[in-house]
Image (tube, rainbow, N blue to C red):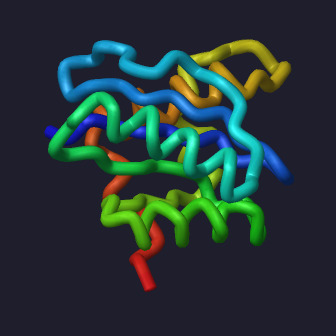
């Protein structure tokens, strides 16, 4: 199973975390600006870990996820964009308030469960 880069996408910034295939957190959740600099810094952090197989998972968020999806596709990553309704159905958090870090971890859990693949949007 590949490592998972989970991205909780918002307008102008996203929360990201990278977890290995065995569940070890390699990059603690942190916020990335939607800019070339923000994406490049994240890519450098990932490349410094020298991992072979990383998949990216994110929820579809109107148009906000598209630049991130494009960036990672252009850099050779396998990208999964899921319907946010499906993501909400699989949350382990019973609280009603939203936190980006929790959403990011929920995406990792969803990826590791391997059930999301039925609901992905195909790459263009």
Position of 36 relative to 46 (above/below):
below
Q: In this rendering, would 34 be left or right of 60?
A: right
Quarter of the figure with residue 77: bottom left
Residue 53 image offset from top left, x and y in percent: 19, 46
Name the residue located 39 percent from the left edge and 64 percent from the top edge: 75
Report the front residue among 123 and 25.
25
Report the front residue among 81 and 43.
43
Q: In this rendering, would 118 be left or right of 101?
A: left
Residue 23 image offset from top left, x and y in percent: 28, 17
Residue 96 image offset from top left, x and y in percent: 82, 20
Name the residue located 60 percent from the left edge and 53 percent from the top edge: 59
Residue 30 image offset from top left, x and y in percent: 65, 24
Q: Could one spot residue 116 in this view of the protein?
A: yes
Name the residue located 68 percent from the left edge and 50 percent from the top edge: 37
Quarter of the figure with residue 1: top left
Q: In this rendering, would 80 be left or right of 50?
A: right
Q: How many marks?
A: 0
Residue found at the far bottom of this picture: 124
Quarter of the figure with residue 61: bottom right
Q: Quadrant of the C terminus?
A: bottom left
Name the residue located 57 percent from the left edge and 41 percent from the top edge: 41
Q: Could one spot residue 118 in this view of the protein?
A: no
Position of 40 relative to 21 (above/below):
below
């Amino acid at each position: 199973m590949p490592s998972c880069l989970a991205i909780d996408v918002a307008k102008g910034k996203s929360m990201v975390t990278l977890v290995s295939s065995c569940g070890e957190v390699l990059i603690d959740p942190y916020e990335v600006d939607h800019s070339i600099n923000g994406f490049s810094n994240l890519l450098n952090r990932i490349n410094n870990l020298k991992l072979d197989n990383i998949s990216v998972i994110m929820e579809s968020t109107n148009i906000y996820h598209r630049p991130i999806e494009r960036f990672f596709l252009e850099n050779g990553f396998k990208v999964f964009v899921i319907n946010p309704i499906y993501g909400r159905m699989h949350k382990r958090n019973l609280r009603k308030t939203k936190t980006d870090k929790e959403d990011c971890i929920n995406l990792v859990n969803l990826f590791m469960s391997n059930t999301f693949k039925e609901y992905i949007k195909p790459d263009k």
